[in-house]
Amino acid sequence: MENNIMFVGIDVSKAKLDVALLPIQEARKGPHKVVDNSPTGHQQLLSWLRSHALARTAGAAEASSLDSSVSLHSLIHVCMEATGTYADAIATTLFEAGCTVSLVNPSQVHAFGQSQLKRTKTDKVDAALIARFCSLNRPPAWKAPAPEVRELQALARRLEALQEMKQMEANRLAAGVSCGIVRASLLDHIAYLENQIDDAQRQIKRHVKEHPALQEQAQLLESIPGIALTTASVLLAEWGDIHQYRGAKQLAAHAGLVPRIRESGSSVRGKPQLCKIGSSRLRKCLYFPAITALKYNPHIRALGERLKARGKSPMLIIGAAMRKLLIIAYGVLKSGIPFDPNFKTQTC
């Protein structure tokens, strides 16, 4: 069955999906299809993929006679870039249909394209490139979050958007507005956004309370000094299943909270920086909690004091605190034990 796996690359955009199948023979071009990025287009794509997979497996003459309920897990491996919300719906649809689905960091595909000396960039070419990347690298399978986690993610991202809109309006107000009508409009909009933010926070709290597993995990995270319900909700929504990570270091890498070292020969001695190749939402949600934890969390306060004594910059200290806070959160959830400031191995 290994030889019958059909590798599929999907280039995702807001309006459409460009889909490429890896050809059976390298000398030929594989099939290509464009569908709308909509529920109707997703079903059209699923039917198209199923027909091609069954044709490759049983032969074109017998494909039409096969049961359409045949599992696609061992027949189709779909790969696409994790480029935001546009890929969420099609990834979930394909996963629920039984396909093996991989969501990969766009940097991986970009680097692969450079290694292939790719000179042309179109949606069709990108889809074929992703299919080849999938065939050669066999990226790990993605698992769709549980429905309650997907809803929590939607609520958390809505709260984030409302807070960003409020900050933009506050910045416009602080910049100075000479027109009274505009100033009144800004104040009204800020008041409206504040009400929406309060409502979103209440909905998040209610949603977590209605699902015992989420509530238990949130309570464990809230036991860590520096983490409140809002941060706990983002963590639970954005890092997915905590058991998918081999360890805390892999989770830190997923969040882009590992140091990037630039040293080469005797001349290149760059300052260490966060690599930032990972979930920006996880990094963003940990920034202010890390500042709080540097004051009130004994483990992170001790870390900050050691780094400060070594002459490290404030931003480097905050980055290290963010990573430490994420590792502590991982340890608390994996162990199922609330944070204990006297437990020296809490962050291992």
Image (cartoon, rainbow, N blue to C red):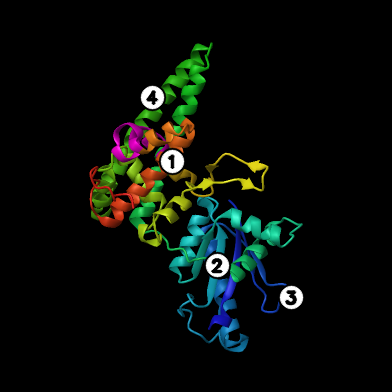
Which numbered circle lies on residue 28? 3
The residue to which callout 1 is attached is: 320
Quarter of the figure with residue 123: bottom right
The answer for how far apart the CA atoms under marks 1 and 3 are is 50 Å
Q: Are marks 4 and 2 in contact (CB under 8 Å)?
A: no
**Along the line of sight, the residue nearer the viewer: 263 or 87:** 263
Q: Nearer the viewer, mark 1 or mark 2?
A: 1
Kindly identify which residue carries mark 4.
191
Identified at 52% across, 14% down, the residue is 176
Q: What amino acid does circle 4 point to? A: Ala
Disc on the earlier residue, 1 or 2: 2
Looking at the image, can residue 158 be seen? no
How packed mark 4 is, by other alpha carbons closer than 10 Å (few <14, some 14-19, many 20 or more), is few
Q: Earlier in the sequence, mark 1 or mark 3?
A: 3
Q: Amino acid at mark 2?
A: Val
Circles 1 and 2 in contact, beta carbons < 8 Å: no
How many marks do you count on the picture?
4
Disc 1: CA contacts within 10 A as few (<14), some (14-19) or many (>=20): many
Calculate the distance from the C-alpha at mark 4 to the C-alpha at mark 2. 45 Å
- Whole-percent x, y for residue 150 in the image: 39, 53
Q: What are the residue bounds of the magenta stretch?
A: 284-302
